[in-house]
Structures are given as structure tokens and as C-alpha cells.
């Protein structure tokens, strides 16, 4: 049985005898994605920035690279947190970074976080409802709490355990069945890359 929680790139690091670290996406149901690259320490080429620990995920635009987690399995409350560094320029549409779906095929969207070149944009389903300024080439901490038929709360660069939400909006409806992290819509028109670190998800409590 799968456990709801997914921890990415920090705790999925295996300590090798003497020599250092190895990184794995084995905890993800789609461990390779399309164009997603997981990197570990030491890094020689490419030199991929990470927020902490030995591993990180980078997706180069334009690419639909992502990892997918199918463990939510009908959760009407879903909480996720991750660090993202949107080193992306140009683009004529929003570049999706994180999407929670009502199925495992990437169909109906429940909640989404995207980047428009200057801001993190939060969505109820596929409808944009809130925007927070986010500078390129800097790490941003994002936590989002989805509640079906209720309110979605989100935090940007704040600790959800102690801080009030950065914002709140009326949720889309329906349970979460899967999530994708990376650039699942391909970031068409963008140049550069998006880096991710320290993804974690819960079914009830803040991360």
C-alpha cells in the first residue's frame, strides 16, 4: 500500500559507503517523466542549483518534463510544499509548475501553481485566481492546501505551521488522484529551466 506522503530529493537520497550520495526518483510513479533530470552531489555538468541536500530536479524549457505521484487516491484534502527556482524567460503562456489532478492521466485539474515570467499564479481548477510576485533565479517556498468544495489556502515564502496564509480562494471541487511537479505543460515559448527541491505532501497536516 502506498503511503500518502511523498518527500522529494532530500530524504530520497541514499548514502553510499564512503563515496557520497546517489539520487533516486523511485518513490514517484513516473520516475523519469519526459525530459526531467534528477541530479546529485557532486555536480559537474550541468551545474544545477539546489536549495539544500544532495539532490534536485531540473527541467529545461520547453519540455514537458515532470515527475508524477499517483498516491493521493481520492483525497478531498491535499497539502503539498516545495521549493522552486523559476529561471525562465520569455513565454506567451503560463508555465505550469505543480498540478493536482482528479485522475492519473493528467485530465481534470483541481489546483495548480504556474509561473508567468514574473509571478507565481494560483488556480482553482484551471482558472487563475491569485498572483504573488516571484523573482526569477531565486528560490521560493510554496505550500498549498486544497480542500474540495471549500477554500484553498496557500503560502509563499512563509511557514504554514506558524504564519497566516498568503492568500485564500474558493476551491474547485473533486478529489485529488495524482500530482505532477516540473513543467507538465511544456513551458512553450520559454527559455531557461525550472529547478525544484524538497517536495513533500500530506493528506491532513501542514508540512
Image: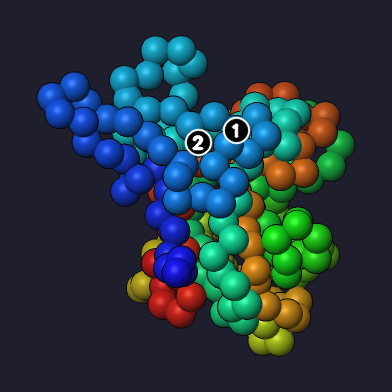
Q: Secondary structure at mark 1?
A: strand
Query: Residue 57 has which mark?
Result: 2
Secondary element at tag 2? strand
Give the residue furthest to the bottom: 149
Residue shown at 35%/45% (left/top)?
A: 12
Quarter of the figure with residue 121 = bottom right
Q: Which mark is residue 69?
A: none
Q: Residue at x 40, y 54 (%)?
A: 7
> Residue at 41% of width from left, 73% of height from top?
206
> Which numbered marker is on residue 36?
1
Q: Is residue 142 above or below residue 154?
A: above
Left or right: 136, with 47 as reference point: right
Residue furthest out toward the left:
18
Q: In which quadrant of the rendered view does residue 24 lie?
A: top left
The image position of residue 54, as x and y in percent, is: 32, 33
Q: Residue at x 54, y 42 (%)?
A: 31
Disc 2 + disc 1, Cβ < 8 Å: yes
Q: CA distance from mark 2 to mark 1?
A: 7 Å
Closest to the observer, 137 or 99: 99
Amino acid at each position: 500500500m502506498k503511503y500518502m506522503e511523498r518527500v522529494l530529493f532530500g530524504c530520497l537520497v541514499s548514502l553510499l559507503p564512503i563515496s557520497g550520495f546517489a539520487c533516486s526518483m523511485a518513490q514517484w510513479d513516473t520516475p523519469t517523466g519526459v525530459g526531467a533530470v534528477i541530479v546529485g552531489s557532486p555536480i559537474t555538468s550541468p551545474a544545477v542549483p539546489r536549495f539544500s541536500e544532495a539532490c534536485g530536479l531540473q527541467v529545461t524549457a520547453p519540455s514537458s518534463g515532470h515527475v508524477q505521484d499517483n498516491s493521493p487516491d481520492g483525497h478531498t484534502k491535499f497539502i503539498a510544499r516545495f521549493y522552486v527556482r523559476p529561471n525562465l524567460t520569455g513565454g506567451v503562456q503560463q508555465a505550469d509548475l505543480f498540478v493536482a489532478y482528479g485522475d492519473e492521466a493528467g485530465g481534470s485539474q483541481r489546483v495548480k501553481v504556474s509561473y508567468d515570467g514574473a509571478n507565481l499564479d494560483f488556480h482553482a481548477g484551471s482558472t487563475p485566481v491569485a498572483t504573488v510576485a516571484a523573482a526569477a533565479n531565486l528560490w521560493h517556498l510554496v505550500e498549498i492546501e486544497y480542500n474540495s468544495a471549500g477554500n484553498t489556502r496557500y503560502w509563499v515564502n512563509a511557514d504554514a505551521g506558524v504564519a497566516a496564509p498568503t492568500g485564500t480562494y474558493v476551491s474547485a471541487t473533486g478529489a485529488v488522484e495524482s500530482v505532477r511537479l516540473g513543467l507538465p505543460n511544456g513551458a512553450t515559448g520559454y527559455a531557461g529551466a525550472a529547478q525544484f527541491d524538497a517536495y513533500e505532501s500530506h493528506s491532513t497536516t501542514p508540512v
